Amino acid sequence: MRDRVLFLDRNDMLCGYQLDRIESMDIPEFENIDINDAIEFYEIKRYFDAGIHLKTWTETSYQEYERKSKTLYGLTMRFINNIDDDNIIKHYAAVDTLYHASFWQLFCICKLHKKILNNAFARLIQSDHISSFDLFEHKEVVTSYGPELRDYILTNVNHIQLIIHVYEQDFTPGKKLFLPDELTGEDICGYISQYVASQNVNPNHLEAIRLMRATVQIPITDEIRLAAKRRYQEEAEKMTSNGTLITSGVGVVLSPDQEEVKKYEQNGNDYTCSYSTKWLKGTLDYPSILNNFIYVFEFVDVPQMRSLQVHTRTQSGVFGRVFQSQSSRMYPDSFGFKSVQNMCNLQMNAYYEFLNANEICLEEVLQWVFTQYLQEEFRFPEMRVRFPSKGTTYSEKCSTIITAFESILKQYCLYVKHGTIDFELMAMSSASVKFDMVPSLLKKKYIYGKGNDYKSLTYLMFSDQCMLSFVPRIYETGKRYDCFLSLFGMRQSICPIIKSATYRLFDTWQSMA
């Protein structure tokens, strides 16, 4: 198969790989081709249908090879249409793994679901080589062989990933799969219960089941979700007691002798951040305290002022992305994200206690921001908000702060909508404010990339799997970079042209938003 043609999207770096095979291909006799030949001819035609060609081809040669591909595709259609109940199992067994998805595409193109009888299809899907995700992607197949596919799912607990994928696809973009109408909600609930009680379970699947909510197609019950939660806890305890643990830690130190404002140290898997109390004592006015959160503790980036306490894809690493829960109802988690969160909590706790020791209440700083600073610096309308006072308990502070920020959001929404804050109007509303519904004074505040070009560009610049970030002479010095952007971002002097081009790219995206 390494020498055969496989169709890949033009944004794939291997797009067109081995397509030059058509240059030396002869039109074979029909009796001399096998199933993989037939599928390869189909893969070649897909390139021409998409208008993809090699740069070495002239217009004349392209037209010549296009005509040849149509002739080869004719052999494909003849071969696939000759598949019947008696030979389909033999032919499918010979299909190379990389061509499984293409086989089912041709199965539908040639409408074999109207020709292959149900009992023959039932024998076919018992093959060890069946790719479930490729099979259930085609609605015509699922509709034609509903009873057989229902039994196919229910007789193997390893198909739980199909059920989870179908549930998640209602909330997330991705490959669309179909389940047969014959598979009832009662069937699915029983199947999930069987999986939870089975001997071999995947903790990520258990976590996804725990986070499910009942839908029309998958009416999961609270009892099943609770069973999944308890089984997950059992599996976690087993891994903790029997597995090999890798420990790591983060620490925050406020040093009276340190001259540097901040300093980072690493010892194995342990990280320590130390801060100069001399600097902190010299910045006890309210504006400087806010700046410390920005420039010293780095809670946000500059100049965008976006929170850095969020999960990013690069924090996960390859294995983290594979093993972390994929549920759309669970915030993405990873070792790197937990480390960031732990560091943030330690920074806040240390600085909060430091301010208290210097008779400054952080809640009063927040009160000042919303009731004085915004009005004096930005001419924002009067805001009414109350943060916890000294002496309140931790639980009381939590309740008060939640209420305070809810009020702040409502007042800001009124300001964006009406240009002022009407407190009587705000009192009329008892509904909570959803973050995704909070308006902005900027008409085009956010940019959301989409499409294959966007995916390709972001992969090249930001992926830790792209080889563009690997430069042997730099790697040999012991330096490592997460992605291409971090590589030339750290070495701006040698990449001014690339950096300028990147900024122009983002300017273009913004103008299109």
Image (cartoon, rainbow, N blue to C red):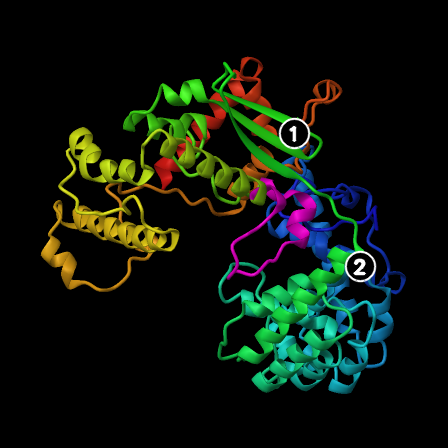
Q: Locate residue 2 relative to residue 465 in the image: left or right.
A: right
Q: Locate residue 387 relative to residue 168 in the image: left or right.
A: left
- Residue linked to disc 1: 468
Q: Is residue 272 magenta?
A: no
Question: Dividing the image into 4 quarters, which one contains the C terminus?
Answer: top left
Q: Which of the two discs, 2 and 1, labels the residue nearer the N terminus?
A: 2
Q: Nearer the viewer, residue 267 or 107?
A: 267
Relative height, residue 145 to residue 511 (above, below)? below
Q: Nearer the viewer, residue 72 or 259?
A: 259
Q: Which mark is residue 257?
A: none
- Specify the segment rendered in magenta: 314-337
Q: Position of residue 52 (x, y in %)?
A: 62, 44
Residues at marks 2 and 1, CA–CA distance in whole angstroms:
29 Å
- Residue linked to disc 2: 97
Q: Position of residue 86 (x, y in %)?
A: 85, 81
Say which amino acid is labelled 1. Leu
Say which amino acid is labelled 2. Thr
Within the image, what quadrant is residue 380 found in? top left
| Image point (71%, 61%), residue name | 237
Q: Secondary structure at mark 1?
A: helix
Relative height, residue 45 to residue 80 (above, below)? above
